[in-house]
Amino acid sequence: MPVPETPVYKTDGPITRKDNVRLARQSSCMQPKPEPVGVKSPAQDYLRPRILPSNPGHHARPGKFVHDIRHSRSFQTVPCHSLTGQNCSFTTNGMGKPVTVVDLFSGPGGLGEGFSPWSPSSSKPRYRIRLSIEKDPSAHATLLLRSFLRQFERGFPREYYAFLNGATPEPNWAQLYPTEWETAGNETLCLELGQEETLGVLEKRIRRLRADFGTDTLLIGGPPCQAYSLVGRARNAGKDVRKTDRDPRIFLYREYVRVLGMLRPAAFVLENVKGILSSRVRGRSIFGEMLRELQTADGQESYCLFGLASSDQPSLPNTTATLPDFSQFLVRAQEHGIPQVRDRVFIVGLRSDVRDRLPAAWRPRLEPTTPVTVRDILDDVPRLRCGLSRNDSLEAWRRAVLEACDIVSRNKPQLHPEKRRKFDDAVSRSRTAALNAHLQREAPGYAGLPKSCPADLRRWIGDDQLERLPNNHTRAHMPSDLARYLFCAAFAHACGRSPKTLDFPAALAPSHKNWWSGKFDDRFRVQLAHRPSGTITSHLAKDGHYYIHPDASQCRSLTVREAARLQTFPDNYFFKGTRSAQYVQVGNAVPPFLARQIADCVGDVFECLDRSQGAKPAKTARKRRPVAQALAVEAG
């Protein structure tokens, strides 16, 4: 039989869905026939990450710092610490390998990033993503780059830091590291779920994964949510119900259910927007339908479902006869160390035989943590100026800001004297910055995160090898919007809240037809420094009106990097595509730091599987959570 031609991966642009269908089929042809489960196959050896030869540019050396590429923190080559500040441990499945993960509707990889951190005490990953599917070319390019970087066990290549720090353009990774780039291309596919060609590729890949790694695997993903979101439904209000009910995105979750039935993983995690809890089609609850289909993905009552709420609500019984209070599936990210108000639905499912091996009282749970504010995340970001939509220059920006200061000073709101003083101070600082500061649209320098940021989150996001923040170039604004941004930031500084429509002076009212209608009472919204931010969404790609920077002297909206920080992406996470595409990626993603906490919860399931299969669990000195205590008591 002739040997197929070796796939050639594109490096001069995003890999398209057609490219990936071709490459996946070639790769499938190249793989050897499946070996019996439990026997090491050549395919397993092919997928194992290579350990690079010694390289002083990015490898650990005694007494030096090396960057932990999985959750983006620096640690010394001594026993390190987990997110709770205690000694961390590493567990694998019963075969002694990392848990195999399949990631659907991956976006730029926020959920997957949380399931990819290293456990430095063993220098091995707890999870290993073997397959990711994303249809958007820009998001896929971001995902592919991050997948490539995860192939390096000892840290990112030094060429990557040279690129991030602006010393060199982005290299041709396929030429520099062909093995790692090819592995990443095989793992990360640009395909659209729901298409016939995608189903054929998936069936072959899942058969291979089951042959190589069995069924003690994990499925994660977040089906598209625009059809369920409260904002999307508000926009559709008044439209023909028959048309909105035929939106194909409503039932894309069934592609997730289809893969769940094919893969039959030990566990799964599904994420979606809060609006799905109340979404209905022809009088039927979409979420209720979803729960029933997830439970029966591999036959009647094949999966038991859990919420992650920290309350003591009971889990969903392993039956389709009754449905619980949906609120147990709602996770408020701001209660778990995420610096933004973000309510999302998470469903954790366990295969019935796996659930039977756990203590009866077991359930995954996210514990509340200290709130994190915008100031805790953005205070050390270099101060920047915005661009102007026409004839941009530093001098033109100065003139526009000074004019905005004059307009706002002439149209002050009616405030208490103390608040009026604070308002005037904010406007004065903006005037001083325009006259004296030499602000740029992208500034060098990297100071990490403020000391007020919790240490575990600071380690997660920060990276001492950076010399500047990537994806941190400001967008351009119309001069007329600068006065509105300045008014909002000054008002928030004085009153502790963002202004509503009625707070705006008539001179600053935009020419929107529905400005005074009350339909959108906060069309211009500043992110308050002393609170978590509002929900970061893909609307950022259209304009920055909902995401005004709290510092009045900067008079601008948030950059991609600032939004990514509020989403808890590591600072070394590079987003590909146009700036608008980058905003969409950040807004649609799951906060990786939240995903990391969910990964820790689900990890207890695989630890239990280790014990039931006779694997010796890793020693740990960390403070045991209630879940681990329940496992210990059950084991007797």
Image: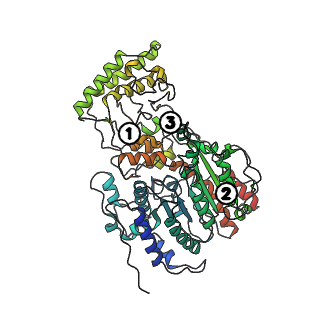
- Camera-near label (2 vs 1) is 2
Q: Which quadrant would residue 92 be assigned to in this image?
A: bottom right
Front position in the image: 219 or 451: 219
Residue plotted at (40% across, 18% down): 506
For label 3, the crowd category at 10 Å Cα-Cα, with few meaning under 14, some 14 to 19 and many 20 or more, is: some
For label 1, the crowd category at 10 Å Cα-Cα, with few meaning under 14, some 14 to 19 and many 20 or more, is: some
How far is the residue under mark 2 from the one under mark 1? 46 Å
How many numbered marks are there?
Answer: 3
**Residue position for label 2:** 293
Q: Which of the two discs, 1 and 3, labels the residue nearer the N terminus?
A: 1
In the picture, the quarter occupied by the N terminus is bottom left
Residue 631 seen in the current view: yes
The amino acid at mark 3 is: Gly
Which label sits on residue 381?
1
Residue 51 seen in the current view: no
Front position in the image: 209 or 259: 259
Q: Which of the two discs, 2 and 1, labels the residue nearer the N terminus?
A: 2
The amino acid at mark 2 is: Glu
Eyeballing the image, is 31 above or below 634?
Answer: below
Element marked by disc 1: loop
How far is the residue under mark 1 from the one under mark 3? 19 Å
Task: Pinpoint residue 603: horizontal percent, then vertical percent.
Answer: 61, 58
- Camera-near label (1 vs 3) is 3
Eyeballing the image, is 366 above or below 191?
Answer: above
Left or right of 607: which side holds 572?
A: left
**Residue position for label 3:** 534
Task: Pinpoint residue 128: horizontal percent, then vertical percent.
Answer: 52, 64
Left or right of 596: which side holds 389?
A: left
Residue plotted at (47% across, 36% down): 374
Eyeballing the image, is 483 above or below 80?
Answer: above
